[in-house]
Amino acid sequence: MMEERVKSIFLELGADLCGIANVDRFSGAPAGFNPTDIYSECKSVIVFARRMPRGTACVNPRIVYNKANDMNLEELDRIGFAASIEVEKLGCTAVPVPSDSPYEYWDSDKMEGRGILSMRHAALLAGLGSLGKNTLLINKKYGNMINIGAVLTTLDLKSDPLSEEMCISSCRLCLNSCPQKALDAQTVNQKLCRQYAYGSNKRGYSVCNCNSCRIVCPRAFGLRED
Protein backbone atom coordinates (compact mmCIF):
# COMPACT_ATOMS: atom_id res chain seq x y z
CA MET A 1 0.00 0.00 0.00
CA MET A 2 1.43 3.35 -1.06
CA GLU A 3 0.34 5.14 2.14
CA GLU A 4 2.24 2.71 4.36
CA ARG A 5 5.28 2.84 2.10
CA VAL A 6 5.36 6.63 2.33
CA LYS A 7 4.93 6.69 6.10
CA SER A 8 7.71 4.13 6.54
CA ILE A 9 10.14 6.57 4.89
CA PHE A 10 9.52 9.18 7.59
CA LEU A 11 9.59 6.70 10.45
CA GLU A 12 12.86 5.18 9.26
CA LEU A 13 14.40 8.67 9.11
CA GLY A 14 13.56 9.32 12.77
CA ALA A 15 9.95 10.48 13.03
CA ASP A 16 7.98 9.05 15.95
CA LEU A 17 4.61 9.60 14.28
CA CYS A 18 3.40 9.95 10.71
CA GLY A 19 -0.06 10.46 9.23
CA ILE A 20 -1.62 11.54 5.97
CA ALA A 21 -4.32 14.07 5.12
CA ASN A 22 -5.59 14.31 1.56
CA VAL A 23 -5.83 17.91 0.41
CA ASP A 24 -9.63 17.70 0.34
CA ARG A 25 -9.59 17.83 4.15
CA PHE A 26 -8.17 21.37 4.05
CA SER A 27 -11.23 23.03 2.54
CA GLY A 28 -11.71 25.12 5.70
CA ALA A 29 -8.16 26.48 5.82
CA PRO A 30 -7.88 30.30 5.83
CA ALA A 31 -7.22 31.92 2.47
CA GLY A 32 -3.50 31.89 1.76
CA PHE A 33 -2.78 29.00 4.12
CA ASN A 34 -4.25 26.06 2.23
CA PRO A 35 -1.64 23.53 1.03
CA THR A 36 -2.62 24.39 -2.54
CA ASP A 37 -1.78 28.04 -1.84
CA ILE A 38 1.77 26.88 -1.15
CA TYR A 39 1.94 24.37 -4.01
CA SER A 40 -0.97 24.34 -6.44
CA GLU A 41 -0.35 20.72 -7.49
CA CYS A 42 -0.52 19.38 -3.92
CA LYS A 43 -2.76 16.33 -3.54
CA SER A 44 -1.79 15.16 -0.05
CA VAL A 45 -0.03 16.38 3.09
CA ILE A 46 2.26 13.99 4.95
CA VAL A 47 2.44 15.06 8.59
CA PHE A 48 5.05 13.75 10.99
CA ALA A 49 6.16 14.44 14.54
CA ARG A 50 8.95 13.87 17.03
CA ARG A 51 8.57 13.67 20.78
CA MET A 52 10.41 15.83 23.29
CA PRO A 53 12.32 14.17 26.15
CA ARG A 54 10.15 13.91 29.27
CA GLY A 55 12.92 15.52 31.28
CA THR A 56 12.45 18.85 29.55
CA ALA A 57 9.18 19.21 31.45
CA CYS A 58 10.95 18.71 34.77
CA VAL A 59 13.21 21.75 34.71
CA ASN A 60 12.83 25.50 34.58
CA PRO A 61 11.85 26.10 30.92
CA ARG A 62 14.69 28.42 30.00
CA ILE A 63 17.97 27.17 28.56
CA VAL A 64 17.34 23.41 28.70
CA TYR A 65 13.79 23.41 27.37
CA ASN A 66 14.44 26.07 24.73
CA LYS A 67 17.54 24.32 23.40
CA ALA A 68 15.81 20.94 23.24
CA ASN A 69 12.84 22.45 21.45
CA ASP A 70 15.09 24.17 18.90
CA MET A 71 17.02 20.95 18.28
CA ASN A 72 13.80 19.01 17.76
CA LEU A 73 12.54 21.53 15.21
CA GLU A 74 15.85 21.36 13.32
CA GLU A 75 15.58 17.56 13.31
CA LEU A 76 12.08 17.79 11.85
CA ASP A 77 13.39 19.98 9.04
CA ARG A 78 16.16 17.46 8.38
CA ILE A 79 13.66 14.60 8.22
CA GLY A 80 11.32 16.57 5.96
CA PHE A 81 14.13 17.39 3.54
CA ALA A 82 15.55 13.85 3.42
CA ALA A 83 12.11 12.26 3.20
CA SER A 84 11.10 14.53 0.33
CA ILE A 85 14.02 13.21 -1.72
CA GLU A 86 12.99 9.62 -0.98
CA VAL A 87 9.29 10.26 -1.67
CA GLU A 88 10.15 11.77 -5.05
CA LYS A 89 11.73 8.46 -6.01
CA LEU A 90 8.16 7.16 -6.09
CA GLY A 91 7.54 9.30 -9.17
CA CYS A 92 6.04 12.45 -7.68
CA THR A 93 6.97 15.89 -6.39
CA ALA A 94 7.46 16.59 -2.66
CA VAL A 95 7.74 19.95 -0.90
CA PRO A 96 9.19 20.10 2.64
CA VAL A 97 7.49 22.83 4.72
CA PRO A 98 9.51 24.61 7.46
CA SER A 99 8.42 23.13 10.79
CA ASP A 100 8.52 26.46 12.61
CA SER A 101 10.45 29.25 10.89
CA PRO A 102 11.03 31.15 8.76
CA TYR A 103 7.54 32.38 8.02
CA GLU A 104 6.28 35.55 6.41
CA TYR A 105 2.97 36.43 8.08
CA TRP A 106 3.45 38.84 10.97
CA ASP A 107 1.02 41.29 12.56
CA SER A 108 3.26 43.61 14.58
CA ASP A 109 0.38 45.16 16.54
CA LYS A 110 -0.96 41.80 17.69
CA MET A 111 2.51 40.18 17.72
CA GLU A 112 0.82 37.39 15.80
CA GLY A 113 2.76 35.11 13.49
CA ARG A 114 1.59 32.24 11.30
CA GLY A 115 3.50 29.58 9.47
CA ILE A 116 2.61 29.08 5.82
CA LEU A 117 0.84 25.91 6.98
CA SER A 118 -0.67 25.38 10.43
CA MET A 119 1.19 22.29 11.64
CA ARG A 120 -1.21 21.54 14.48
CA HIS A 121 -4.24 21.69 12.19
CA ALA A 122 -2.46 19.60 9.57
CA ALA A 123 -1.68 17.03 12.27
CA LEU A 124 -5.30 17.11 13.41
CA LEU A 125 -6.49 16.43 9.85
CA ALA A 126 -3.91 13.64 9.46
CA GLY A 127 -5.25 11.83 12.52
CA LEU A 128 -2.24 12.38 14.78
CA GLY A 129 -4.28 13.79 17.64
CA SER A 130 -6.82 16.35 18.80
CA LEU A 131 -6.41 19.94 19.96
CA GLY A 132 -6.33 20.86 23.63
CA LYS A 133 -7.67 24.01 25.23
CA ASN A 134 -4.08 25.26 25.20
CA THR A 135 -4.24 25.02 21.36
CA LEU A 136 -1.55 22.30 21.34
CA LEU A 137 -2.00 18.98 19.58
CA ILE A 138 -2.45 16.02 21.95
CA ASN A 139 -1.37 12.62 20.68
CA LYS A 140 -2.62 9.45 22.39
CA LYS A 141 0.87 7.99 22.85
CA TYR A 142 3.11 11.04 23.32
CA GLY A 143 0.70 13.69 24.57
CA ASN A 144 1.47 17.32 23.73
CA MET A 145 5.24 16.95 24.14
CA ILE A 146 5.79 16.76 20.40
CA ASN A 147 6.84 18.99 17.52
CA ILE A 148 5.31 18.68 14.06
CA GLY A 149 6.53 18.83 10.47
CA ALA A 150 4.89 18.37 7.06
CA VAL A 151 5.63 17.57 3.43
CA LEU A 152 3.31 18.36 0.52
CA THR A 153 3.17 15.89 -2.34
CA THR A 154 1.49 15.28 -5.69
CA LEU A 155 0.76 11.71 -4.61
CA ASP A 156 -3.01 11.29 -4.23
CA LEU A 157 -3.05 9.44 -0.92
CA LYS A 158 -5.86 8.25 1.33
CA SER A 159 -6.36 10.19 4.56
CA ASP A 160 -5.83 8.48 7.90
CA PRO A 161 -8.81 8.24 10.29
CA LEU A 162 -9.27 11.24 12.56
CA SER A 163 -8.19 10.88 16.18
CA GLU A 164 -10.46 10.47 19.15
CA GLU A 165 -10.87 13.53 21.39
CA MET A 166 -7.98 13.65 23.85
CA CYS A 167 -8.66 16.85 25.80
CA ILE A 168 -10.62 16.28 29.02
CA SER A 169 -13.80 18.32 28.65
CA SER A 170 -14.03 19.37 32.31
CA CYS A 171 -10.33 20.21 32.70
CA ARG A 172 -9.19 23.84 32.96
CA LEU A 173 -5.64 23.37 34.23
CA CYS A 174 -3.96 25.02 31.25
CA LEU A 175 -6.41 27.93 31.26
CA ASN A 176 -6.03 28.54 34.98
CA SER A 177 -2.25 28.17 34.98
CA CYS A 178 -1.57 30.80 32.31
CA PRO A 179 -0.06 33.82 34.11
CA GLN A 180 -1.13 36.10 31.25
CA LYS A 181 -4.66 34.72 30.86
CA ALA A 182 -3.84 34.37 27.18
CA LEU A 183 -6.00 31.29 26.61
CA ASP A 184 -9.76 31.13 26.10
CA ALA A 185 -10.05 27.38 25.31
CA GLN A 186 -10.24 28.17 21.58
CA THR A 187 -7.28 30.39 20.72
CA VAL A 188 -4.21 31.97 22.27
CA ASN A 189 -3.60 35.70 22.47
CA GLN A 190 -0.12 35.65 20.98
CA LYS A 191 0.75 39.13 22.14
CA LEU A 192 0.07 38.35 25.79
CA CYS A 193 1.86 35.01 25.49
CA ARG A 194 4.93 36.22 23.60
CA GLN A 195 5.54 39.22 25.84
CA TYR A 196 5.78 36.95 28.87
CA ALA A 197 7.06 33.62 27.59
CA TYR A 198 9.84 34.52 25.16
CA GLY A 199 12.93 36.62 25.56
CA SER A 200 16.68 36.42 26.01
CA ASN A 201 19.04 36.13 28.95
CA LYS A 202 21.88 38.49 29.85
CA ARG A 203 24.19 36.54 27.57
CA GLY A 204 21.85 37.16 24.63
CA TYR A 205 20.58 33.61 24.19
CA SER A 206 16.92 32.98 23.42
CA VAL A 207 15.00 31.55 26.35
CA CYS A 208 11.47 30.31 27.02
CA ASN A 209 10.29 31.63 30.37
CA CYS A 210 6.96 29.81 30.49
CA ASN A 211 5.51 26.52 29.25
CA SER A 212 2.99 25.93 32.03
CA CYS A 213 0.03 25.37 29.66
CA ARG A 214 1.96 22.48 28.13
CA ILE A 215 3.28 20.69 31.19
CA VAL A 216 0.26 20.99 33.52
CA CYS A 217 -1.91 19.13 31.01
CA PRO A 218 -2.98 15.69 32.31
CA ARG A 219 -2.35 14.45 28.77
CA ALA A 220 1.12 16.03 28.49
CA PHE A 221 2.66 12.57 28.10
CA GLY A 222 -0.29 10.78 26.53
CA LEU A 223 -2.60 8.20 28.05
CA ARG A 224 -1.30 6.09 30.89
CA GLU A 225 -1.22 2.40 30.05
CA ASP A 226 -1.51 1.14 33.61
Image (cartoon, helix red, strand yellow):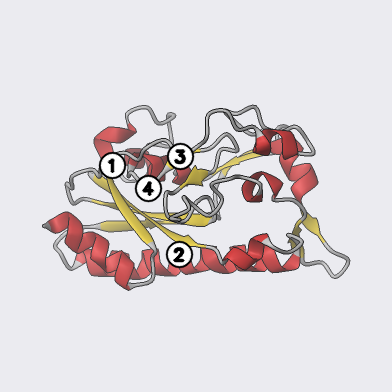
Q: Are circles 2 and 1 on residues that touch, CB within 8 Å?
A: no
Q: In the depicted view, which residue is nearer to us: 163 or 193?
A: 163
Q: Please name which of the two marks, 4 or 3, marks the residue nearer to the observer.
A: 3
Asked whether, in this view, residue 67 is left or right of residue 149, the answer is right
Q: Secondary structure at mark 1?
A: loop
Could you tell me residue 121's position as x and y percent?
A: 43, 39
Amino acid found under the numbered disc labelled 4? Leu
Asked whether, in this view, residue 126 is left or right of residue 111, the answer is left
Quadrant of the rendering where the C terminus is positioned: bottom left
10 Å neighbourhood of mark 3: few (<14), some, or many (≥20)?
some
Amino acid found under the numbered disc labelled 3? Met
Q: Please name which of the two marks, 2 or 1, marks the residue nearer to the observer.
A: 2
**Disc ID at residue 166:** 3
Q: In the depicted view, which residue is nearer to us: 71 or 152?
A: 71
Amino acid found under the numbered disc labelled 2? Asp
Q: Are circles 4 and 3 on residues that touch, CB within 8 Å?
A: no
* First-in-chain label (4 vs 3): 4
Task: Give the CA separation, mark 3 to mark 2.
Answer: 27 Å
Label tally: 4
Q: Secondary structure at mark 3?
A: loop
**Disc ID at residue 40:** 1
* First-in-chain label (3 vs 1): 1
* First-in-chain label (2 vs 4): 2
